[in-house]
Image: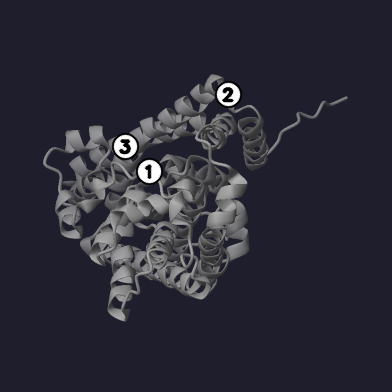
Amino acid sequence: MIKRKFSLALHWQILIMLALGGFFGYFFPHLTRYTNWMGDIFLRGLNMVIVPLIFCSVATGVANVGTAENLGRLGLKTMGYYALSTLLAIITGFFFVQLFKPGVGADLGLQVPVEEISAGRDSFGQTLINIVPVNIIKSMAEGHMLSIIFFAILLGFFITRVGEKSRVVLVDVLNAILDVIMKITLFIIRFTPLGVFSIIAKVISQQINNGNNVSEILSSMGIYVITVLLGLLVQGFVTLPLLVKFIGKANPLKHLKNMSTVILTAFSTSSSNATLPLTMETVETKSGVSNKIASFTLPLGATINMNGTALYECVAVMFIAQAYGIDLTLGQQLVVVFTALLAAIGSAGIPMAGLVMMAVVLNAVGLPLEGIGLILAVDRILDMFRTVINVYGDTCGAVIIAKSEGEETLV
């Protein structure tokens, strides 16, 4: 008699541990200090492979693209998609915040002291200048993703400009390193359920230990939370699928199903970068996007394509203005839309980076920086939802661009 080995799909393992982690964190918050190490090690493992993964994948992706004409075409398509999807996200958020006006009558007594937000005061121009690294090794050590991507694009492009012998050797070396990094990544991904359990338990327990009564917060900030979530739902289940369907000529439902593990991991980690190794592997194996497209679009998307963050920043800034009773002129509202688009590009793919970048938008329209304190109580939870849209938007972009390049994908 043949014994069948029981196997549960990874996304079901993650979903079960997600629920168990929430239960454990809510009912046993004092015990989470004994499980935090699992989440810490899991995130450290993912962060360990991010820099070599991004560097090698972007460099090989650009080298495989070949000519400057091909690279320019692919770059224009990628940036065009990022700009379009992010702008649509901002417009969606703007529509809902004007419809529900969640800030009118908001309780200013819920305001939390704001600290360490000054990092968001860098201008957009300075952000662009900082893309060019002074020391690439230092940029790698400090995890400056835009600088790493910029150098990797340069390296990949000029690999195609050297002699055939040198080009083959360099591409083979980078591909070999990338293969090893992907093997390490797949090993780390096996522990995702345990990492998710620990991270969720820690987040829930922190809310409870900080004295945040969930029902009280929701009663005071409920309309704001609903406004953000409605905007994110429309972006994730209407706008992005329509782009995949009509621009990418692909099956959006099948692609969404394929990305279930990626979505659950993004929700749990609240980090586009931490999810990136799994995102790349899943987009290639399940949705059938070539490594050439995935290795170029996804690392870039994890750094600058922030649909969820842009929508959230627009809603949050308008909420703060409404809460303080400040009527923004049409010109100021357009500034909010435009600045949210630029600030989303400057947001690093790390937890709560959007909160830091919001200072840029607030400064642009003269709103008090202290207004950020109004939304801190619910920001960590909303961060999980907007990261899902950030990551899912990247995967949709990879499929759309692959289809536009004539690739036969699996969706």
**Pointer 3 local density, CA inside 10 Å: few below 14, some 14–19, many at least 20:** many
Disc 2 designates what residue? Answer: 30
The earlier-in-sequence mark between 2 and 1 is 2
- Determine whether the residue tagged by mark 3 lies in a helix, strand or loop: helix
Q: Give me the C-alpha separation between circle 2 and circle 1.
A: 26 Å
Who's the residue at 38% across and 33% down the image?
Answer: 47
As drawn, 210 above or below 164? above
Q: Give x and y (percent) for residue 82.
A: 37, 64
Name the disc covering residue 154, or none: none
Q: Quadrant of residue 242?
A: bottom right
Q: Give x and y (percent) for residue 344.
A: 33, 58
Name the disc covering residue 350, or none: 1
Would you say residue 293 is visible in this rendering? yes
Amino acid under disc 1: Ile
Q: Is residue 114 left or right of residue 40?
A: left
The earlier-in-sequence mark between 3 and 1 is 3
Indicate the quadrant containing the N terminus: top left, top right, bottom left or bottom right.
top right
Q: Give x and y (percent) for residue 220.
A: 55, 55
Disc 3 designates what residue? Answer: 51
As drawn, 380 above or below 137? below
Amino acid under disc 3: Val
Are discs 3 and 2 less than 8 Å apart at CB? Answer: no
Amino acid under disc 2: His
Would you say residue 65 is visible in this rendering? no
- Determine whether the residue tagged by mark 1 lies in a helix, strand or loop: loop
Task: Mark 3 vs mark 1: give the one in front.
Answer: 1
Q: Quadrant of residue 44?
A: top left
